[in-house]
């Protein structure tokens, strides 16, 4: 019974940021957290995205469904205000948000614009820091914070370009945040999936080649799904992982061990 209790999320409350459609990694995470018993707050980017996300939120019985564009002043704060009013507490957050202007993403790092680099850092990295700051007072009994990274943060991955340095900053932020929030029982993780075909990934030049190479070289010789990422992430939010924090958790069939 103790083992089972340590591996469920019954009664836990969590926020999922970044669902764009049914192929999103964030949606895979949402399904997994819900399957373990958690209640979810779901956000959508804007009015254009709402019709794609709302049916998914309904399928997850999400009692909180609100807009959130981290570039719009006050929207992220409004999300946490809704959670505070509805629940008064929070146990986990999944931050699956990233963006870089196409012209900067498709060019060399040395050629990226200051504006493009700043925007990519703000949306993809600093927004996670803001999430942690807003979540902290609601995590009265501890909790867990997750953000999505990629192997290109550690090694050069062709065509990942600008997002490599941005994700490296994100992973470093995870380590420092884990150190700062650990005394309050709040764990922080960077999740690093292998290539997954999502709308965001489609913006990376020659992404199909990257997926094929990963499938060929990974020790398990196959690509992962959003459900694989989701369940592994959800398990880290359970008490079974209460002494794990500050890590970059690879979910890539072992691809990262090949160098």
Image (cartoon, helix red, strand yellow):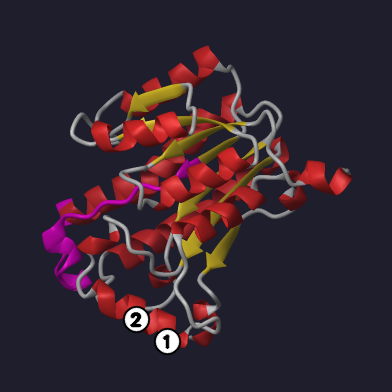
Secondary structure of residue under mark 1: helix
Horizontal side, residue 159 vs residue 141: left or right = left
Can you give x and y, in whole percent of width and height, for residue 218 in the image?
A: 49, 82
In the picture of the structure, the residue carrying the numbered disc 1 is 216
Q: Nearer the viewer, residue 153 or 196?
A: 196
Q: Nearer the viewer, residue 88 or 46?
A: 46
What is the crowding at mark 2: few (fewer than 14 residues within 10 Å), some, or many (at least 20)? few
Quadrant of residue 8 within the rendered picture: top right
Residue at 55%, 78% in the rendered image: 254
> Is residue 141 visible in the rendered structure shown here?
yes
Q: CA distance from mark 1 to mark 2?
A: 6 Å
> Is residue 157 visible in the rendered structure shown here?
no
Q: Residue furthest right?
A: 1
Horizontal side, residue 145 vs residue 211: left or right = right
In the picture of the structure, the residue carrying the numbered disc 2 is 212
Q: Quadrant of the N terminus?
A: top right
Q: Are marks 1 and 2 in contact (CB under 8 Å)?
A: yes
- The relative height of residue 58 versus residue 159 in the rendered view (above or below) is above
Residue stretch rendered in magenta on the structure: 94-115
Q: Is residue 174 magenta?
A: no
Mark drawn on residue 144: none
Can you give x and y, in whole percent of width and height, for residue 238 in the image?
A: 70, 45
């Amino acid at each position: 019974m103790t083992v089972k209790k340590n591996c469920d999320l019954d009664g836990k409350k969590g926020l999922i940021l970044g669902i764009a459609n049914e192929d999103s990694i964030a949606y895979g995470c949402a399904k997994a957290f819900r399957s373990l018993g958690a209640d979810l707050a779901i956000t959508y980017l804007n009015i254009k995205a709402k019709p794609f996300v709302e049916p998914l939120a309904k399928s997850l019985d999400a009692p909180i469904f609100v807009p959130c564009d981290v570039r719009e002043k006050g929207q992220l704060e409004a999300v946490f205000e809704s959670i505070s009013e509805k629940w008064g507490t929070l146990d986990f957050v999944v931050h699956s948000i990233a963006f870089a202007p196409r012209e900067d993403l498709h060019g060399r790092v040395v050629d990226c614009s200051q504006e493009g680099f700043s925007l990519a850092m703000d949306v993809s990295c600093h927004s996670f820091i803001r999430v942690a700051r807003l979540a902290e007072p609601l995590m009265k009994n501890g909790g867990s914070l997750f953000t999505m990274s990629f192997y290109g943060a550690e090694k050069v991955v062709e065509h990942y370009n600008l997002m490599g340095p941005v994700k490296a900053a994100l992973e470093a932020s995870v380590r420092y945040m884990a150190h700062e929030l650990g005394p309050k029982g709040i764990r922080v993780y960077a999740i690093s999936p292998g290539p997954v075909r999502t709308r965001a990934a489609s913006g990376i030049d020659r992404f199909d080649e990257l997926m094929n190479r990963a499938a060929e070289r990974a020790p398990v010789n196959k690509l992962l799904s959003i459900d694989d990422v989701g369940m592994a992430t959800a398990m880290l939010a359970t008490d079974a992982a209460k002494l794990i924090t500050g890590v970059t958790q690879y979910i890539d069939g072992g691809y990262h061990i090949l160098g």
